Image: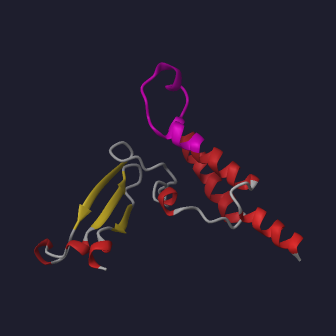
Amino acid sequence: LRHKLQQNMASKGQNNPQFARLSHLYQAAALLGIPNDTKSTKDIDTQGLSRFYLHNFRSVARKQVLRVDSPIKRTICKRCESLLVPGVTSEHRIENKSKDGKKKWADVLVVECKACGTVKRFPVGQDEHR
């Protein structure tokens, strides 16, 4: 019983090879996802390669039933699977649609992907209300 428990804990831990694979895919996508104007990368579609790595990242996580942290998930567009970099590949703004913006706890972070136009909304300022 103890041996099975140790195996189960090791399979869910950060030392799992699948976590290493996910980390490598995400880091490669992040490195290629930020556009730059160097001559060596003009011939290569780095945005497309970044999307390919993020597609693999999501499919591996789904197939292995691994939980991806929320801060990581928030940097990936669900529609086109591009990396959401503030000011570069996405636009971030805070909206408050309460009456005259009086309710500070009703603030919402709106992230819009510049590649496909998908909008994601995340609540912010909820801690002040509670």
Q: Quadrant of the C terminus?
A: bottom left
User: Does residue 18 appear to the left or right of 71 in the view shown?
Assistant: right
Measured along the vertical axis of the image, is residue 46 above or below residue 103? above
Taking the spot 58% from the left edge, 62% from the top edge, the residue there is: 68
Q: Quadrant of residue 8?
A: bottom right
Residue 42 placement (x, y as % from top left): 49, 25
Measured along the vertical axis of the image, is residue 73 above or below residue 89? below
Residue 95 placement (x, y as % from top left): 23, 65
Residue 14 placement (x, y as % from top left): 68, 57
Instruction: Give the magenta-colored segment's residue range.
Output: 27-47
User: Does residue 111 appear to the left or right of 42 in the view shown?
Assistant: left
Does the segment drawn in magenta span residue 34? yes
Colour scheme of the picture: secondary structure
Q: Quadrant of the N terminus?
A: bottom right
Q: Quadrant of residue 7?
A: bottom right
Taking the spot 65% from the left edge, 51% from the top edge, the residue there is: 22
Q: How many marks?
A: 0
Residue 83 placement (x, y as % from top left): 48, 48
Taking the spot 58% from the left edge, 43% from the top edge, the residue there is: 27
- Which residue, as the protein is rendered here, is positioned at the far front? 2
User: Does residue 82 appear to the left or right of 94 in the view shown?
Assistant: right
Does the segment drawn in magenta span residue 71? no
